[in-house]
């Protein structure tokens, strides 16, 4: 990681563990800072996804929405809604459109739960 307050995670869902085309994959990079009150806020975010359109996509609106926010369960729910507007999955051999939308939602949750284990996974069900 290039910066002390940065986090990066990659997630992949596929039928086989190795050497398989992903049904959906996602990468999230965050840079964090503390605000005046000492709360951790996201100062920069980069989010991409594959398998949710004809080519991998940078989720520009979702990443922009994260900037300046404090990571919590309600933020995750909000960004999943935004991410859903930026993707155009098709049904194919790797899964249906609905399945791929669900996978991306689950991968976004996985990123945040890995970065911030204090978040309550039950609140994201």
Image: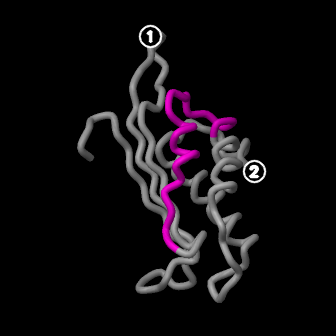
Q: Is the residue 116 above or below the residue 96 in the image?
A: above
Q: Is residue 29 left or right of residue 120?
A: left
| Residue 36's disc number | 1
- Local SS, label 2: loop
Residue 73 part of the magenta segment: yes
**Could you classify mark 1 by the number of other residues whose Cα lies within 10 Å: few (under 14), some (14-19), or many (20 or more)?**
few
Q: Percent position (x, y) of residue 9?
A: 42, 54
**Which residue lies most toward the left here?**
2
The color scheme shown is one colour
Report the residue at 66% width, 49% height from top. Answer: 80
Report the residue at 48% width, 27% height from top. Answer: 41
Magenta-drawn segment: 55-75
Q: Are marks 2 and 1 in contact (CB under 8 Å)?
A: no
> N-terminal of the two: label 2 or label 1?
1
Q: Is the residue 96 above or below the residue 120 in the image?
A: below
Q: Nearer the viewer, residue 98 or 111?
A: 98
Mark in the foreground, 2 or 1: 1
Determine the image quadrant of residue 52.
bottom right
Q: Percent position (x, y) of residue 57?
A: 51, 62
Disc 2 designates what residue? 125
Report the residue at 61% width, 34% height from top. Answer: 72
Q: Is the residue 87 above or below the residue 89 in the image?
A: above
Report the residue at 68% width, 56% height from top. Answer: 84
Q: Is the residue 95 above or below the residue 74 in the image?
A: below
- Local SS, label 1: loop
Determine the image quadrant of residue 23.
bottom right
Residue 88 part of the magenta segment: no
């Amino acid at each position: 990681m290039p910066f002390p307050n940065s986090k990066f995670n990659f997630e992949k869902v596929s039928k086989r563990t190795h050497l398989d085309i992903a049904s959906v994959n996602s990468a999230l990079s965050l840079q964090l800072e503390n605000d005046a009150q000492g709360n951790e806020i996201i100062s920069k975010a980069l989010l991409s996804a594959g398998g949710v359109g004809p080519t991998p996509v940078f989720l520009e609106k979702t990443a922009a929405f994260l900037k300046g926010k404090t990571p919590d369960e309600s933020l995750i729910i909000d960004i999943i809604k935004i991410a859903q507007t930026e993707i155009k999955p098709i049904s194919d051999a790797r899964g249906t459109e609905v399945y791929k939308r669900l996978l991306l939602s689950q991968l976004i949750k996985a990123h945040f739960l890995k970065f911030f284990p204090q978040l309550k996974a039950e609140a994201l069900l």
